[in-house]
Image (tube, helix red, strand yellow):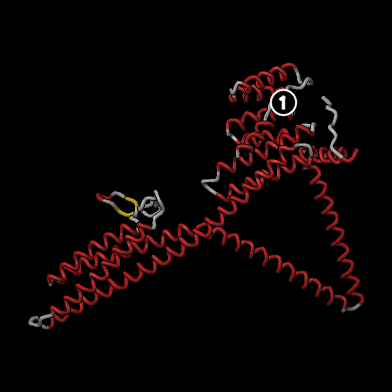
Amino acid sequence: MKAFSLYALFVLSVLAPVFAYAESARSLNSRGNALYAEGKYDQAIEAYEQAAAEQPESGEIAFNKGNAFFQKGEYDKAREAYEAAALRTKDLSLEARAQYNLGNTAFNEGQKLLAADSKKALTQVEASVSHYREALRIDPELDDAAKNIEVARLTIKDLMDRIKKQEEAARERRKQQEEYEKQIKELVREQESEIKDNESVREKMTANPDRTLSEETKKLASDQKSTKDKTRKLSDKMKADQPQGQPQSQPQPQQQSPGPQGQTGTAPSPMESLDKAAAAQQTAVRQLEDGTIDEAKQHQQEALDRLKDALAGQKDSQQAQQQPSEKKGDEGQKQDQQNEARQSSGEDKKQDGKARQDASQQQPGEQQKQEKQAQSRQQGEKQQGDEQSARAALREQPNDILREEKENRLQLQHSVSGGYQPVEKDW
């Protein structure tokens, strides 16, 4: 990207003041240029804004102000100033440079978004290519724009590869999360089954107090130990699969659980709930081995509650990851609705055609009456269309007129001698 930066600096030189300014505007612009050269961009912007107050339609002042904002990294304001410069100036060379700097601005905005959102970064870099192409269209000799297009294209390729890898990684994460949810559900079922087995043994002991059920109790302890080991193993695996530097407990403001003394706290992560479940299961194993199955059931129930917490947390985590896909789904649904509307419109047209066909089979007198009504409707629609066109013409903005005038002038110049010729400055 070093070569790209050099191209930007090459074109980001501040234009000298033009002689047609009012005295105050010329001096203010010169002061801004001097401050810009010293790196005092805030003061330069202030001077340019004062000059613009005296000469509001000056493209040169807007361009200079855009350069100062660009150097500060305030790309949104730089873009606004460059757009104003491209629109206001009658100098095609300056318009081309404004488009070039709009490309630089979009490219740098994309660079800032690389870490946060690769797709938005890609959109900005693609926009930079459009501006560079527009600069070349206006001034085919602007070689820096052609070079920057190649740099931007390489960046676009890298971004597309990065996005593809991110999407593949996201699919793998979703698949992994679904497998975790499946395993937690299996642990919940096992824990519920073990609680039922505990109750069954207790019923047998109640029915026959003199009966020894040591074998049944040992089996309860063995089954509970097996479920505990699975719980601990799953928790360890989920921790190992956590991305580097990511905390195990993610803040989730939308899920608040009661804390001590009525306070609220962040809901525990699925791994934390699994750890608590495993601890309760370990206690239940010891109690079952000692034959105290009543106390063991309490800890088995606690383990079940924690497993259900882990399952709920896992579902919430998956839902949070799927939110971008849901948005795409909403857009797809909106598109489907639009398609249905178009199909409905097509059906209406078919029905209208059928109605006209039926009308042609009516009696001659009735047919003439229908034709007159149709002609009347057509005249009314034509009059309404003319009125809308007139209103649209009244609403046309001066900027649109300037763009049309500039486009006509550009086409005329390109047609002379088959190439670009600088227009005479009219200030």
Q: Nearer the viewer, residue 332 or 426?
A: 426
Side (left or right) of 215 relative to 401: left
Q: Nearer the viewer, residue 395 or 246?
A: 246
**Residue 69, located in which quarter of the rendered image?**
top right
Side (left or right) of 367 relative to 278: right
Estimate the x, y position of residue 157 in percent, counting from the top left. Answer: 62, 51
**Residue 198, located in which quarter of the rendered image?**
bottom left
Estimate the x, y position of residue 302 in percent, counting from the top left. Answer: 24, 64
Q: Which residue is mark 1?
A: 15
Side (left or right) of 92 relative to 245: right
Identify which amino acid the numbered label 1 is placed on. Answer: Leu
Q: Residue at x 59, y 41 (%)?
A: 109
Q: Nearer the viewer, residue 217 or 147?
A: 147
Q: Residue at x 62, y 45 (%)?
A: 124
Estimate the x, y position of residue 74 in percent, counting from the top left. Answer: 58, 34
Numbered disc 1: secondary structure: loop
Estimate the x, y position of residue 180 in percent, counting from the top left. Answer: 39, 65
Q: Nearer the viewer, residue 224 or 87?
A: 224
